[in-house]
Image: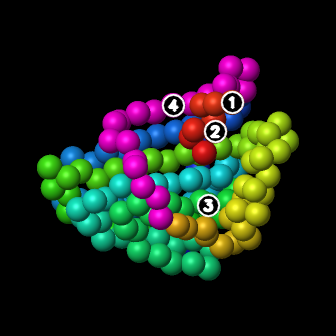
Amino acid sequence: MKPYIEKINPDSNTTWRLEHYLSLEESYELKCDWHYHHEYELVLCHDPGGAVQCTAVSGDHCYEQAHNTLVLYGPGLPHMMSGYVHAKKDMPVSNHILWFDPRWIEKLIQAEPALQLLNNTLKRSNAQKMESSSASNVPNKSQSYSEKPSNSPLLVNLIIL
């Protein structure tokens, strides 16, 4: 199957977008077809009840989505996921997804030398291989944000990263 290109930011002036997907449904199929985009994609899964049974594929790597899985997909890296969610009403499942333009993060790294430690992670995410790790303390609010470069406060951007 050929991946399709997913357009993340219809406004060409938008440098990043953050979405929070909150699932209160009890059972449903989870499917995200084979796709890629020009932005980086950082995904955090919040599943404290272990309700998600999902396999993700990117480049040459497969993984099972679990609580506090943090994944970084590089620009142009095809990826997909498929599985089921069996959420409990008292313990919802959520995903926080941050898409950001490569030029935006490059400018941040140039402006703040301490962020140069991100360079290796960003390069590995572009090498047809997925980066994943564990994270914690995910907020439980349903939110959506996007920021344009003209009014992008550095502190907000660093908190999101």
Where residue 50 sits in the image (x, y, percent)?
Answer: 26, 66
Residue shown at 67%/59% (left/top)?
Answer: 74
- Name the residue tied to disc 1: 154
**In the rendered structure, which disc, 2 or 3, sits on the residue that comes first in sequence?**
3
Residue shown at 46%/40% (left/top)?
Answer: 19
Question: In the image, which residues are magenta?
Answer: 134-153
Q: Are marks 1 and 2 in contact (CB under 8 Å)?
A: yes
Where residue 10 sits in the image (x, y, percent)?
Answer: 62, 33
Residue 30 horizontal side relative to residue 49, left or right: right
Q: Quadrant of residue 53?
A: bottom left
> Label 1 neighbourhood size at 10 Å, few (<14), some (14-19), many (20+)?
few
Per the model, the C-alpha gap separating discs 3 and 4 is 19 Å
Give the amino acid type for the residue marked by disc 1 in the picture: Leu
- Name the residue tied to disc 2: 158
| In-front residue for pair 50/29 | 50
- Name the residue tied to disc 4: 145
